[in-house]
Image: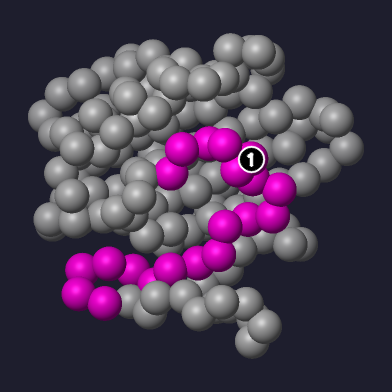
Amino acid sequence: MKLIAALAFCLVTACGLPQGASSTSASPSSSPLAKASGRLDAQVPMPAGFPVDVPVYTKARLTAAAGFPSTGPTSWGMEWQTLDSVSKVQAFYADKLNQGDWIITFTSTANGAFAATFRRKSDSHISGTLAANNSSGVTKILMSLVTPAA
């Protein structure tokens, strides 16, 4: 779990945002994003090129995101926040990532947190990690995804 959180932290913050990555401010031409409110951080836009068929928890706000396009594999790191419980988030992903072209494997579930890996059924090279934990009444959902070179 700590490794997944560290990876997401590196992808989203410590490594910096590459060209075209999402930041905490929206451009004037983009749709309005939610400002920080209550216990949730400000919303950021979805990074360009992120696969549209990856399930996203519907009651969560994307609060950190970065895409790392390259001539090789492309990777994304994201964090969502929700006031829903970790168990609701886990149930959502257990259902949605076992439908269609996705499969999920939970690697750890304990003390109000979980960690999992997921991949495409049709191309196991498209894979990611998913984790969620709750602190101070906010559930953080961390996702990383890697796709092979096109």
Q: Residue at x 56, y 77 (%)?
A: 31
Which range of residues does the magenta coloring cover? 37-56
Looking at the image, residue 4 sits to the left or right of residue 12; the answer is: left
Magenta span contains residue 48: yes
- Residue 88: % across, % down: 19, 37
Residue corresponding to mark 1:
51
Q: Quadrant of residue 14?
A: bottom right
Name the magenta segment's main secondary structure: loop
Q: Can you say which quadrant of the picture contains the C terminus?
A: top right
Looking at the image, residue 97 sits to the left or right of residue 18; the answer is: left
Q: Can you say which quadrant of the picture contains the N terminus?
A: top left
Q: Residue furthest front?
A: 100
Q: Where is 138 relative to 117, above or below? A: below
Task: Tell me the kind of residue under disc 1.
Answer: Pro
Q: Residues within 10 Å of mark 1 (few under 14, many from 20)?
A: few
Q: Residue furthest bottom?
A: 28
Q: Secondary structure at mark 1?
A: loop
Looking at the image, residue 29 sits to the left or right of residue 4; the answer is: right
Q: Residue at x 49, y 48 (%)?
A: 78
- Residue 84: % across, % down: 18, 49
Q: Residue at x 50, y 80 (%)?
A: 32
Q: Quadrant of residue 19?
A: bottom right
Looking at the image, residue 142 sits to the left or right of residue 40; the answer is: right
Q: Where is 141 relative to 20, above or below? A: above
